[in-house]
């Protein structure tokens, strides 16, 4: 027993994700500036830093020279991060292509690209080969750092091929794989040319996790319908063993937000903003500028709301923080122009010489400023067309202990399953319903706001990111124990 505990304390967790929690930019031949990356995965995993974890991921930057590679590896080591270096053409085919132009839209029910079919088929294969190649490169680095007894936790749709690459090299490696996006209905997954290969690779993991029970169910039925495998209450039977499949809903570290709000500078900033917005209610959107986030729908609904409720025209503003993302993918470039056009039109129609109803920012804001903004907001709008979980909804709730604002939440975000009773749930495709929900939120009585906030706050503060990671890792460790017991029998 004692020996077991000692061994256990030496074991580490290798967290493998396409993007490291730190984004590096070069400021000299061998010097780097390091910044926290954007996105749901990073914000969740930042809440789990007590675990003895090492991070393995793409550095997010092209480093062609050896001096750069060595100095960046050194700088990142101080943050427990290990970079994977990818050549530019691999990044283009793997990250921009297969990950962000094929898997991402497909998993969010937006379908496969439909341009020229022949061209797509050809480039599809090139992109899939680059995807497999990139996953092999991740596997190389994992194997370099893996020691007996460590667990490997692979994340997201970028690394669906990784469990297979790792198991081929070391059958005894304990591997978890977690998807941060929805896993779509098997009818959608069936359209993907590499549908079987990806499912089989994921099944090489010991534990497969999703944010919601529905996504786990879709995955199991894809394995049954596409691969003809047996689903069991625990998961999927594959090659003489059961791969566990389960839901592990993610959360945030709510205390991190509460602590920042207590900071006197942040309090001062809150006062300044309250003064600036006096006499107006604040609606807020915080999203990466991605087609899954339903930003055009959100703004179109705001336009309809202003049209139908003229008494609100000079009493409300919409602040939309739209963080640029995946800017090399043409679909994202088109979306940026579309959003700018709608925002421009609404401001042109409803603005005055001194005020504009929409404040649209094409950039992220610092963490302290974000917390202050959440705290002064009356209504947050999460209108995703599909979203794995959506942690903006959690972050907003964590910052609303004094204001008790309203959360408008898409029923197609995973968070609808946990915050559904406190939020106003909407179908973002229905612009009229969305516009009506803005009015309902703005006119809601303080008692009802308080009741709804209490519900959400209790959930957000008890279902933390740390708890999520511990649940997943302990499930993974269980499978290791079971293996040991089986070999002893
Ligand atoms: C989502 C994905 C993450 C990804 C993030 C940011 O949250 O699930 O895996 O890191 O978006 O996107 P990016 O392409 O910039 O990494």
Image (cartoon, grey):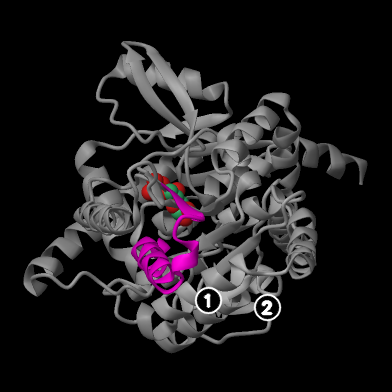
Residue 317 horizontal/vertical position (percent): 47, 53
Depth check, mark 2 against mark 1: the one in front is 1
Q: What is the secondary structure assignment of the residue under circle 2? A: loop
**Is residue 294 shown in magenta?**
yes
The image shows a total of numbered marks equal to 2
Numbered tag placed on residue 91 in the rendering: none
Instruction: Identify the residue position indicated by label 2 in the image.
Output: 234
Report crowding for label 2: few under 14, some 14 to 19, many 20 or more residues within 10 A (C-alpha): few
Q: What is the secondary structure assignment of the residue under circle 1? A: strand
Q: Quadrant of the C terminus?
A: bottom right
Q: Is residue 446 above or below residue 81?
A: below
Q: Is residue 244 visible in the rendered structure shown here?
A: no
Q: Is residue 208 above or below residue 432?
A: above
Observer-nearest of 443 and 4: 443
Q: Earlier in the sequence, mark 2 or mark 1?
A: 2
Q: Which residues are magenta?
A: 293-321
**Is residue 192 shown in magenta?**
no
Q: CA distance from mark 2 to mark 1?
A: 33 Å
Residue 299 horizontal/vertical position (percent): 38, 62
Q: Is residue 29 visible in the rendered structure shown here?
A: yes
């Amino acid at each position: 027993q004692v020996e077991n505990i000692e061994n256990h304390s030496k074991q580490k967790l290798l967290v493998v994700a396409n993007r490291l929690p730190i984004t590096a930019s070069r400021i000299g031949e061998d010097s780097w500036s390091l910044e926290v990356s954007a996105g749901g995965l990073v914000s969740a995993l930042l809440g789990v830093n007590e675990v003895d974890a090492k991070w393995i991921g793409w550095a997010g930057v092209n480093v062609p020279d050896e001096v750069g590679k060595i100095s960046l590896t050194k700088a990142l080591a101080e943050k427990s991060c290990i970079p994977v270096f990818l050549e530019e053409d691999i990044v283009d085919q793997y990250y921009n292509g297969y990950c962000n132009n094929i898997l991402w839209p497909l998993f969010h029910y937006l379908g496969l690209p439909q341009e020229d079919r022949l061209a797509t088929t050809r480039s599809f294969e090139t992109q899939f080969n680059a995807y497999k190649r990139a996953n092999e490169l991740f596997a190389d680095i994992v194997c370099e750092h893996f020691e007996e007894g460590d667990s490997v936790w692979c994340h997201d749709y970028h690394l669906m091929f990784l469990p297979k690459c790792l198991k081929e090299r070391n059958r005894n490696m304990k591997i978890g794989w977690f998807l941060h996006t929805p896993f779509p209905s098997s009818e959608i997954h069936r359209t993907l040319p590499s549908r079987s290969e990806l499912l089989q690779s994921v099944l090489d993991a010991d534990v497969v996790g999703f944010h919601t029970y529905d996504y786990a169910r879709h995955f199991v039925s894809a394995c049954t319908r596409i691969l003809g495998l047996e689903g069991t209450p625990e998961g999927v039977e594959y090659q003489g063993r059961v791969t566990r499949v389960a839901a592990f809903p993610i959360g945030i570290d709510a205390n991190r937000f509460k602590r920042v709000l207590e900071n006197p500078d942040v309090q001062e900033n809150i006062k300044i903003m309250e003064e600036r917005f006096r006499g107006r209610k604040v609606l807020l959107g915080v999203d990466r500028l991605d087609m899954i986030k339903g930003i055009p729908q959100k703004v179109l609904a705001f336009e309809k709301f202003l049209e139908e409720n003229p008494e609100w025209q000079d009493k409300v503003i919409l602040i939309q923080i739209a963080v640029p993302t995946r800017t090399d993918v043409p679909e994202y470039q088109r979306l940026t122009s579309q959003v700018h056009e709608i925002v421009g039109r609404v401001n042109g129609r409803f603005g005055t010489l001194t005020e504009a109803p929409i404040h649209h920012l094409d950039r992220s804001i610092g963490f302290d400023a974000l917390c202050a903004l959440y705290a002064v907001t009356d209504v947050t709008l999460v209108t995703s067309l599909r979203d794995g979980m959506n942690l903006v909804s959690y972050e907003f709730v964590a910052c609303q202990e004094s204001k008790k604002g309203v959360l408008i939440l898409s029923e197609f975000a995973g968070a609808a399953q946990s915050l559904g009773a406190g939020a106003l749930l909407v179908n973002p495709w229905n612009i009229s319903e969305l516009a009506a929900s803005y009015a309902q939120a703005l006119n809601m009585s303080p008692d009802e706001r308080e009741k709804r906030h209490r519900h959400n706050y209790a959930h957000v503060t008890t279902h933390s990111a740390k708890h999520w990671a511990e649940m997943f890792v302990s499930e993974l460790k269980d499978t290791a124990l079971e293996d040991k017991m089986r070999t002893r029998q």
